[in-house]
Structure formats: C-alpha cells, structure tokens
Amino acid sequence: MKGTTMGQLFALHDETSAPEAAREALSATRRSFGMIPNLERVMANAPALLAAYSALWELFDRTSLSPVERQVVYQTANFENDCAYCVPWHSYLAEQAGMAAVDIEALRAGKPLATPKLEALRVFARQLIHNRGNISESDLKAFLEAGYGEEQALEVVLGLAIKVTSNYTNSLAGTPLDDAVAKFAWRKPTIAMRPGKEG
C-alpha cells in the first residue's frame, strides 16, 4: 500500500498517493491547517469518511458553542474513548482557543473543570457517551440550569458524532501521533478508568 509506514497497517496518504476522491479534501486541509495530520491521511483511504469528517468539523465550528466549549466536548469524548491520538491534538487546540491551563489539564485527567459552566458541559457530554444518549431528565435539567439551551444540547450530539469518526478511526488504524503535538503525548490515567468515577 503506497504511503504505508513500518508497522502501520493503514496507508498514510497525501495528495499524490490518495484515492482521487480524497485529494481535494487533503489539499484543503493543508491550505487551512498548514499540514495534513495523520488522522486525515488515514481517513483518505475511505474518501467518504474523510469528506464526512471534514464537513461535520466545519458545521460544528458554526454552532452556538464557543471555541472553548467545542474543545470541552471534543476532549471529553477523546478521554472517554481513550484516544491517545486525539487528546494531544485537542490539548493543543484548546490552548489555541484560549482555554485555561487548569481546565486543559483537568480534561486530560478526566477530572472536574474549574469553570462551573464548562464542567456542566463536560458532565453532560460524558453522560451522553456513557448512557448512549439515554440520560435522565434530571441530568438534562442540570445542563439547562447551567446556562445552556436545547440548541446546545443537540449541538453536543454533533460534536460527539465527529468524535466517533476520529476516535474510532484512530483505534482501528493505530494512527501515529504527529510530531507537531508530540509534547502533548498522553496515556489515559488508570485511576480515572474505574466505572462511575469522575476522577
């Protein structure tokens, strides 16, 4: 498979090796991001997946959730889905979005956030993941009482859908971490893996 690295089952494509249907999406990623992360290189093996991921990402950016709030949703899913590829990237992106360092570290540890409204968002996203969307009326009420609305509740669903595509891809492919975020390398803390624990 052209583009495959040693020990890497899935090809890591660029604009020259990818299937034709994926090349423009890879080019667009390079233009907007300055590089093509390995996630997109792997996704290029299935052009429809790459197109869906790119489109959903752009749509989530247009929601009413702030850049910091979007990173809370993303990073909560990354943690819960044990994505050693995405946690480093979203540590970097959260920093770029202006998230407080204490909250970035809390997300990486699966612990409560220092900012109450962001913590309510984290808990809501976590509950949706753990309960497969079947959260209680009281849990939804707590989210709404924190200052969010029905629109934001549904936007969280969109954010989690994006993370299904990336987290599952990385788990399946063993996507190697990019050098650009190597300093944010991460392993899930074992203490936070106990069922029902908030850390």
Image (cartoon, rainbow, N blue to C red):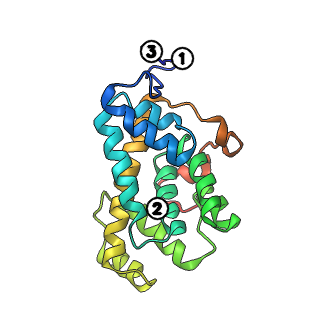
Q: Nearer the viewer, mark 2 or mark 3?
A: 3
- SS assignment at label 3: loop
Give the number of the disc on residue 112: none
Q: Position of residue 103 (x, y in %)?
A: 64, 66
Give the number of the disc on residue 2: 3
The reply to whether discs 2 and 3 touch (Cβ–Cβ < 8 Å) is: no
- SS assignment at label 2: helix
- SS assignment at label 1: loop
Q: Tell me the kind of residue under disc 3.
A: Lys
Q: Mark 1 to mark 2: distance in Å?
A: 31 Å
Q: Tell me the kind of residue under disc 2.
A: Val
Q: Tell me the kind of residue under disc 1.
A: Gly
Location of mark 2 (residue): 73
**Among numbered discs 2 and 3, the one appearing first in the sequence:** 3
Give the camera-side residue of 43 and 73.
43
In the image, residue 184 above or below residue 18: below
Quadrant where the C terminus sits is bottom right
**Among numbered discs 1 and 3, the one appearing first in the sequence:** 3
In the image, residue 92 above or below residue 14: below
Residue pictured at 62% horizontal, 53% vertical:
91
Could you tell whether 140 is left or right of 109 in the image?
left
Give the number of the disc on residue 7: 1
Give the camera-side residue of 142 and 160.
160
**Among numbered discs 1 and 2, the one appearing first in the sequence:** 1
